[in-house]
Amino acid sequence: MTSTLASAPADRAASARDTGTPRRGTRLLALPEARWAAFAAVCFLLALPAQLTGAPAWAWGPLYALTYAAGGWEPGLAGLRALKEKTLDVDLLMVVAALGAAAIGQVMDGALLIVIFATSGALEALATARTADSVRGLLDLAPATATRVGADGAEETVPVEELSVGDTILVRPGERIGADGRVLDGAGEVDQATITGEPLPVAKEKGDEVYAGTLNGTGALSVRVERDASDTVIARIVRMVREASETKAPTQLFIEKVEQRYSLGMVAVTLAVFLVPLALGANLTDSLLRAMTFMIVASPCAVVLATMPPLLSAIANAGRHGVLVKSAVVMERLGQIDAVALDKTGTLTQGTPRVTDILPLTGSGLDEDGLLVLAAAAEHPSEHPLGHAVVDAAHRRGLAPPTAEDFDSTPGVGVTATVDGRVVAVGAPARLLNGATDADSARASVLAGGLEDDGRTAVVVTVAGTPVGVLGVADRLRPDAGATVASLTLLAGTAPMLLTGDNPRAAARLAAEVGIGDVRAGLLPQHKVGAVRELADTGRKVMMVGDGVNDAPALAAAHTGVAMGRAGSDLTLETADAVIVRDELAAVPAVISLSRRARRLVAQNLVVAGVFITGLAVWDLVGNLPLPLGVAGHEGSTVIVGLNGLRLLREAAWKRAAG
């Protein structure tokens, strides 16, 4: 059960994560709270039949004592600490009520209260721990060791925790990088998909930044460590997850404001329920029993537990499916959006290239098929996605490229190979043309520039150093882009707006494919911010979805900012409210739906809690509510509310949201 007055359960949950919780796949009994609750329940179940069958008190009394101690020591201690800070803790009230019941001979009833109370706390701890574990499991990527190179060139394998800023590490092909740093020497292509979501390996050379946990493909890299192990991208994301589980949504904050005054009022009424009948001549035991019953049934435990379990469970479930939601506040806000703005590149497009243009130079003696065959032959041994795009284009045309010899690949530049006795190079215009001013280079440069102006990647093909043609390569539209836009339109009540820095023609073409009518093209970052604020000024709750780099200002300006697969960016970690770690666009409407379901569960929980508290309190005041029934009703409603919130941990909850 939660006590937001003193945040004691949050502290207990944090302690569980820090000391007793496995890094992945937390089970209920892996949590200290659950183990204490289970022990208390076992002691209760052993004591109860012994008492009911008339066994002597020495047979069941110590078992009840263990029940009280196991289930009540932690919330009782936390409550006393809160009391020292002049904060009234609902958990402490429950322990006091249980002890009060025992003091008047209702030992079994007090023990039952302790058992159900401890079970409620275990359920909340599970929700909190699962939140951290789910996302942390996605990001448990960094290697345990790294190869450190000393000043004398000697290599040693050390745990990554021993690396210091300024150390140099060697990363061989096929190894994961052990620390965030910068390349000192070497060149390679690093697969950053597990961190940034980028589907294309990124060429790295001297001066480029690399991240712990990413996979080095070709070429050895010498990397200078620039962050301690505790400050890497992965470590910071784990900290963010922990902070997310400890944040409080606006609904929860409102409940806290009411709860303090309510609890003080409840204590005052409890004293009145005890003292007034006593002053009128009622029996001491009966008056105390009625007062203890009222304290139990009027405590706002279920109300306190109504909000956070659904939100924390939604955060955990989203994390399992590649969506990092940074706080409970964000999870609640996601369900409020009624307008969406989308970036184009990296958001609606997926980064998987395809050949869109084949432009042989006049005078080269090549037609489109001839140019493509040469390029595909040279690129065939390459593992680079651009090379795959060229080879796939040839295969789609039914062409059979000849076998290349003397293949060589230079990251960031391109490939060279001997094809039918000719040296063919395929690569970046800036590197292969290299400022050449001859007529062929000039024509190739013009063609490449035109393709790049139209939003495509230009690839130059040369034979013996002379340009013979240019290929245009463009991102593929995400397969689910159209369906996602339709889902967002349904959820927000209006079609998304497209905000892009690309030229109007390319933007309009893509927008038409996915069903977007409102297109703002040729925008700089500040213009995107203006468009978001323009929507917000009309009273809309705007979600901005972008790639998290040049879109960062707009992400920050939006009601909710969502970054697509760029978790490795420092800027994203600071500005985006949520990160789609796996780079799946369909996760955006799914997490909105999940948030809205969490909000509905919060409302359901508040209704359930209110009905139980009101009904039981009125029964006790105007009738004769038996203590066991009051305990069962109050704590039963708390467990119901907790379990209702935990429903969002199930896989079915995500499938329903994504459906």
Image: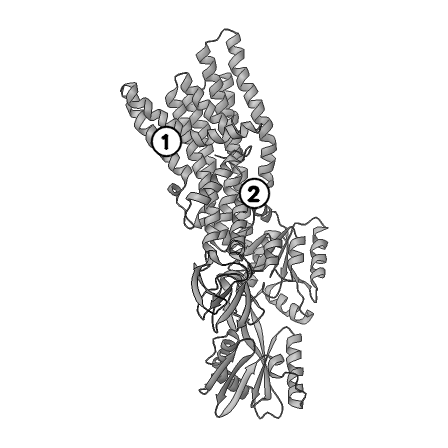
Q: Is residue 651 above or below residue 393?
A: above
Q: Is residue 380 visible?
A: yes
SS under mark 1: helix
Q: Quadrant of residue 21?
A: top left
Spatial CA distance of label 1 from label 2 is: 30 Å
Q: Quadrant of residue 534?
A: bottom right
Location of mark 2 (residue): 247
Looking at the picture, tell me which residue is in the foreground, 550 or 651.
550
SS under mark 2: loop
Which three-letter amino acid code belongs to the residue tagged 1? Ala
Upstream in the sequence, badge 1 or badge 2?
1
Name the side, left or right, on which 322 lies relative to 249.
left
Q: What residue occupies the far front of the structure in this picture?
A: 152
Q: Position of residue 537 (x, y in %)?
A: 73, 50
Q: Is residue 87 above or below residue 541?
A: above
**Residue drawn 30% across and 23% down?**
60
Looking at the picture, tell me which residue is in the foreground, 358 or 385.
385
The way the protein has been coloured in the rendering is one colour
Q: Position of residue 471 (x, y in %)?
A: 58, 81
**Label 2 near label 1: C-beta < 8 Å?**
no
Q: Quadrant of residue 157?
A: bottom left
Q: Position of residue 118 (x, y in %)?
A: 42, 33
Location of mark 1 (residue): 40
**Residue drawn 47% across and 21% down?**
293
| Residue neighbourhood size for the residue with mark 2, other residues' Cα within 10 Å, grouped as few (<14), some (14–19), many (≥20) | some
Report the number of discs. Answer: 2
Which three-letter amino acid code belongs to the residue tagged 2? Thr
